């Protein structure tokens, strides 16, 4: 479990993280979402004790990271695929990391095998592709068999097979009761991987909820309707409180009424409907909606000031 | 989860050890980063870089090469002195036994190479991003710094001492040709070997402190060159008593007082020189340690 409490990081005049508080729970995959520069990586570095918070505190499993007696066995982190000396081989990198915690060589071979690095383990890490670098970073994170995993953009640069592998891996680790905290820019990937989402923007938490709540909560259900009499149906549905967009010649997009009500309205008025498709809101739409709100919230005082 | 394409990479965790999974203090009894383990890690990091090994080998080659060259030059000089009274007078002015300092004649280059190595081992942690891995594994940071310092200083001392010894062995037959005697086992030879090796280890430590403070390879090496090569010359060229006096306190000018058989005017006393060199090592290292602990990685 990761508990972040009022975490703030100020770089000179720029506030990267502004009083962020949240809890990442064990046994589920928690996604960390936000635009570039929102403060995701900074927050993760502060959890790992690499960056010193300007104010606030963060604990992992009850203790600040620095105070754990065997930190690599407590938390595994992939913060930067390039957190490796470019001239050292992947194997020696992992061996040196393992040595600090007396992690046996057999475990080094194990994580190399798990991440599919056998063929390149003896080569210089500097020559690795982005994807291979990610695999090495994940191998390093898994080295101590940690209870908590922090992965910053783990699928960045991975091939499709690697993306599926990471998704399966984190779901498997969470199912074992571990804490998994990962950030990603790939909304579709996040939708398939995370159970819970923390969305930040401009250094603040915008949303902190189960992923389903975020998808359904912010965007209303919509339905695609095709009919021969779009204009008449439009008026009828609008009369029942729906907001209707006349998309094409025969196509309406209805918001605010469920498909059953739409179908009954059409039938009662003898209108033929030949397509009725509930549109599932995507995480991406929910995310855009959320971050749009955030921007509106911030610009409101300025709008009032001009009145 | 185990479709055929992902099967070879599917997670194969070892059987979870019965205690470590969910209890809050599950890892407290498992091995963590003690100093000896961190030292072992730094040794692995040190020997797994080809560039490091090349720098160590270069030091040995330069030391032995300059020892041989210097033996030949000293022999030529002594040879000339037997026929030329002017040269004999110059030789006498140099203080008699020239042969004894032959094995350490490459020390200026050894300090440059191993001092740069000290800079690089630390600055490359930051330029490559390795520091994030290092300090995630050792979040208290200072054990990793101390372990690296031990590795850098011990290696520099040993490489300098061994190559000085070998340079002596190579120089003996060359000097012998000119009728000059060098006994690598004499007390003055041993003193020169030890003082110079300690000195080079000190330079490497200063280099490591610079690498930690500046976090940039070029900047760190330039600062090192500034302190050990530019400053002594600049201080000599600038007129005025202040610079003449200050020059004595540069780290590079502490070796002669430490190895001199008797006190030479306008140099520090041996004990003063030891203190000055010590301060040049301790102050930058303390500053580096404090900043390393406080700054973001």
Image (cartoon, rainbow, N blue to C red):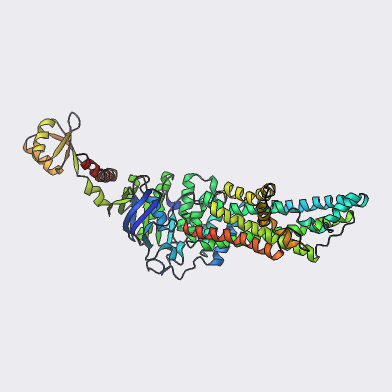
Give the vertical position of B277 relative to B220 (above or below). Answer: below
Query: Is residue B75 visible to us here?
Result: no
Choose top left, top right, bottom left or bottom right for residue B28: bottom left
Query: Which residue: 9% across, 32% down?
Result: A232
Q: Nearer the viewer, residue B10 or A83?
A: A83
In the figure, is residue A264 to the left or right of A102? left
| Relative height, residue B173 to residue A256 (above, below) | below
Q: Is residue B261 above or below residue B61?
A: below
Image position of B181 (left or right of B34): right
> Which residue is farthest right?
B83
On the rendered structure, is B224 left or right of A128? right
Asked if residue B206 can be seen in this view, the reply is: yes
How far across and how far down the image is residue B239, in percent? 68, 48
- Left/right placement of residue A207 relative to residue A45 reads left
Q: Foreground: B166 or A171?
A: B166
Q: Residue at x 18, y 28 (%)?
A: A249
The mark total stands at 0
Q: Position of residue A76 (x, y in %)?
A: 44, 58
Residue B243 position, x and y percent, is 66, 52
Q: Residue furthest bottom?
A: B29
Report the quarter where the C terminus of chain A lies. top left
């Amino acid at each position: 479990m990761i508990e972040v409490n009022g975490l703030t990081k100020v770089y000179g005049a720029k506030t990267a993280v502004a009083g962020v508080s949240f809890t990442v729970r064990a046994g589920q995959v928690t996604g960390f979402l936000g635009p570039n520069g929102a403060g995701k990586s900074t927050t993760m570095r502060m959890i790992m004790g690499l960056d010193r918070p300007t104010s606030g505190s963060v604990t992992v499993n009850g203790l600040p990271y620095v105070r754990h007696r065997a930190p690599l066995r407590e938390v595994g982190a992939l913060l930067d695929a390039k957190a490796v000396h470019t001239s050292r081989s992947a194997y020696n990198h992992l061996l040196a990391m393992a040595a600090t915690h007396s992690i046996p060589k057999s475990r080094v071979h194990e994580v190399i095998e798990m991440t599919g690095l056998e063929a390149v383990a003896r080569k210089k890490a500097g020559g690795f592709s982005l994807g291979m670098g990610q695999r090495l970073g994940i191998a390093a994170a898994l080295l101590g068999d940690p209870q908590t995993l922090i992965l910053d953009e783990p699928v960045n640069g991975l091939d499709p097979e690697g993306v599926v592998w990471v998704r399966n891996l984190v779901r498997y680790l969470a199912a074992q009761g571990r804490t998994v905290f990962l950030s990603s820019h790939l909304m579709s990937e996040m939708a398939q991987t995370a159970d819970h989402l923390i969305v930040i923007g401009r250094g603040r938490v915008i949303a902190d909820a189960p992923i389903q709540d975020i998808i359904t909560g912010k965007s209303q259900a919509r339905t695609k309707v095709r009919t021969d009499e779009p204009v008449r149906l439009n008026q009828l549905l609008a009369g029942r409180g729906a907001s209707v967009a006349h998309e094409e010649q025969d196509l309406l997009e209805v918001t605010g009424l469920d498909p059953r009500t739409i179908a009954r309205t059409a039938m009662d008025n003898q209108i033929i409907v030949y397509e009725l498709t509930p549109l599932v809101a995507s995480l991406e739409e929910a995310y855009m909606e959320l971050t749009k709100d955030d921007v509106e919230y911030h610009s409101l005082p300025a709008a009032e000031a001009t009145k | 989860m185990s479709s055929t394409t992902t099967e070879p990479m599917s997670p194969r965790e070892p059987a979870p050890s019965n205690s470590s999974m969910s209890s809050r203090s599950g890892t407290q009894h498992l091995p963590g980063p003690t100093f000896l383990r961190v030292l072992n890690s730094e040794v692995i990091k040190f020997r797994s870089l080809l560039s490091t090994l090349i720098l160590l080998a270069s030091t040995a080659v330069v030391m032995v090469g300059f020892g041989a060259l210097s033996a030949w030059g000293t022999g030529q000089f002594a040879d000339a002195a037997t026929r030329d009274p002017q040269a004999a007078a110059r030789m006498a002015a140099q203080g008699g036994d020239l042969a004894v300092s032959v094995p350490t004649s490459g020390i200026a280059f050894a300090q440059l190479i191993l001092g740069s190595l000290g800079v690089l081992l630390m600055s490359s942690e930051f330029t490559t991003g390795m520091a994030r891995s290092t300090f995630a594994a050792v979040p208290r940071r200072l054990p990793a710094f101390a372990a690296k310092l031990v590795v850098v200083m011990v290696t520099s001392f040993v490489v300098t001492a061994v190559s000085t010894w070998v340079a002596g062995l190579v120089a003996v037959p060359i000097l012998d040709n000119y009728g000059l005697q060098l006994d690598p086992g004499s007390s003055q030879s041993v003193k020169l070997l030890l003082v110079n090796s300690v000195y080079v280890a000190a330079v490497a430590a200063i280099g490591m402190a610079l690498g930690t403070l500046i976090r940039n390879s070029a900047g760190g090496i330039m600062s090192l060159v500034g302190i050990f090569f530019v400053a002594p010359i600049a201080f000599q060229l600038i007129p005025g008593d202040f610079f003449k006096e200050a020059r004595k306190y540069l780290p590079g000018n502490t070796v002669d007082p430490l190895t001199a058989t008797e006190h030479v005017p306008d140099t520090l006393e041996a004990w003063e020189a030891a203190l000055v060199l010590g301060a040049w090592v301790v102050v930058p290292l303390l500053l580096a340690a404090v900043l390393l602990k406080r700054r973001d990685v």
